[in-house]
Amino acid sequence: MAIVDLVMPKLGESIMEATILKWHKQPGDTVKMDETILDIATDKVDSEVPSTVAGVIDEVLFNVNDVVPIGTVIAKIRTGAADQLTSNPVVSSPVKETVASYPAPQDADVVETIQRTATPPSSNGSSNRFYSPLVLNIAAGEGVSMAELEKIPGTGNEGRVTKKDILQYVSNRKVSGYGSRVANQQRVTVFNESSVSENYSSPDSGQQPSTGAGQQLTTYTGNVEIIEMDRMRRLIADHMVRSKQTSPHVTSFTEADVTNLAQWRDKVKKDFEKREGTKITFTPLFIEAVVRCIKKFPLINCSLDGNNIIIKKDINIGMATALPSGNLIVPVIKNADQFNLVGLTKQVNNLADAARNGKLKADDTQGGTFTLTNVGTFGSLMGTPIINQPQVAIMAVGAIKKRPVVIETPAGDSIAIRHMMYLSMSYDHRIVDGSLGATFLTAVAKELENFKSDREF
């Protein structure tokens, strides 16, 4: 018999951790090769983790809702033991609790200090605590010293500081100067049905801390309804805040006369669907134009690593897709420059369908180098999109509207009814200056305006 470690798999270059959603197997359960053991989630997509071997689950090391760094051992599988189950049944040992059920404080002036007794296996600070690369990056970006970091109570496994913990600390510090008064603050533990959350109040803030289970520090007046954000919405919010903290955003705007493109699509869409078995939307036409311009301006297709600019040779276009729940996800068309229009159309439709039906794979949302979002789908004329990290630019296309426009003809200027559309692009001003950003955006608009109305599909 041998014990095989099951580790949290790598899910993409920008993904440093994942949340455990559900264990399908428990200690003592048999498992086959490639059989799903647990479900995990990142800020990109939910995914299943299959077994790498056949055997028996010997131990699971984390609980549901734990945030686990990539590469961490999450379970142990005993191989060659399936035949011994009947004679030597496995006794399931409970998962070690990472957050205990602590009693609510009995006195608002005397708040119990919660001690974590588990000792992490490794540390990258002066104290005996482990910090994930993501937590360290956020701390560095927000000017949080290691001394401050070591005083932040961790809600992760074995008392580790999670991304949520460090972002909450930064938020509290900005609002109330939390960072300068860590030692004098009171800690209040608020209980609900699903998790333990921590709220802080400073002795000189004028706020009264919560003194019982389920109570909140914030009060609301008037006729309100409180809806807790679902997990995906929380992840999206976290991702968007981090993007704004990471990249100085600049947004440029232009408009394009897409009359030829719109009329061509109207003319061919029935034949296209009949021949190819799928509908042609505007999205693949927009992506086609973006890809052509990226080839002319490769610096738009890059990311930043410290002081190094990483220019991506692969052109992987993310397409923001709205889900039935109202949340947003960004599946990626890999090597978009290698598809013709028919291929792009099928890629767009297949990924959109998979997203709406919850069938996206983890790899379907990884590796994007540039993102397109069609805000016009919902009637918006234009938008100021937030960059999808670690990319440096995202383009938004607005609704196509018929408007009277002055056009130049051999006989002189005239007014005509044209199909007009606004385009906007947000870009990381650390890398992309206004000249490059505006030039690239204008180039895409020109590609759309010069669409050949007699082309074949």
Image: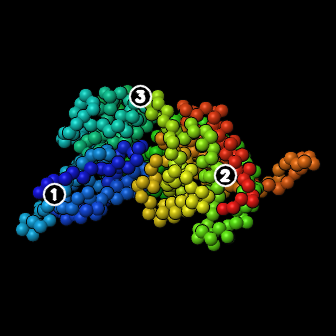
In the rendered view of the protein, which quadrant contains the N terminus? Answer: bottom left
State the residue position of label 1: 78
Q: In what element is the residue under mark 2?
A: loop
Crowding near the residue tagged with mark 1, few <14, some 14–19, many ≥20 C-alpha atoms within 10 Å: many
Type of amino acid under label 2: Gly
Q: How many numbered marks, from 0 up?
A: 3
Type of amino acid under label 1: Arg
Alpha carbon distance from label 3 to label 2: 38 Å
In the rendered view of the protein, which quadrant contains the C terminus? Answer: bottom right
Q: In what element is the residue under mark 3?
A: loop
State the residue position of label 3: 143
What number is the disc on residue 398?
2
Q: Nearer the viewer, residue 269 or 415?
A: 269
Alpha carbon distance from label 1 to label 3: 45 Å
**x, y percentage for residue 86?**
9, 69
Upstream in the sequence, badge 1 or badge 2? 1
Q: Nearer the viewer, residue 337 or 329?
A: 337
**x, y percentage for residue 110?**
26, 38
**Who's the residue at 55% across and 52% down the image?**
338
Alpha carbon distance from label 1 to label 2: 55 Å
> Does residue 19 show up?
yes
Mark 1 and mark 3 in contact? Answer it, CB < 8 Å.
Answer: no
**Who's the residue at 74% across and 50% down the image?**
450
**Who's the residue at 68% across and 55% down the image?**
399
**x, y percentage for residue 335?**
52, 50
Crowding near the residue tagged with mark 2, few <14, some 14–19, many ≥20 C-alpha atoms within 10 Å: many
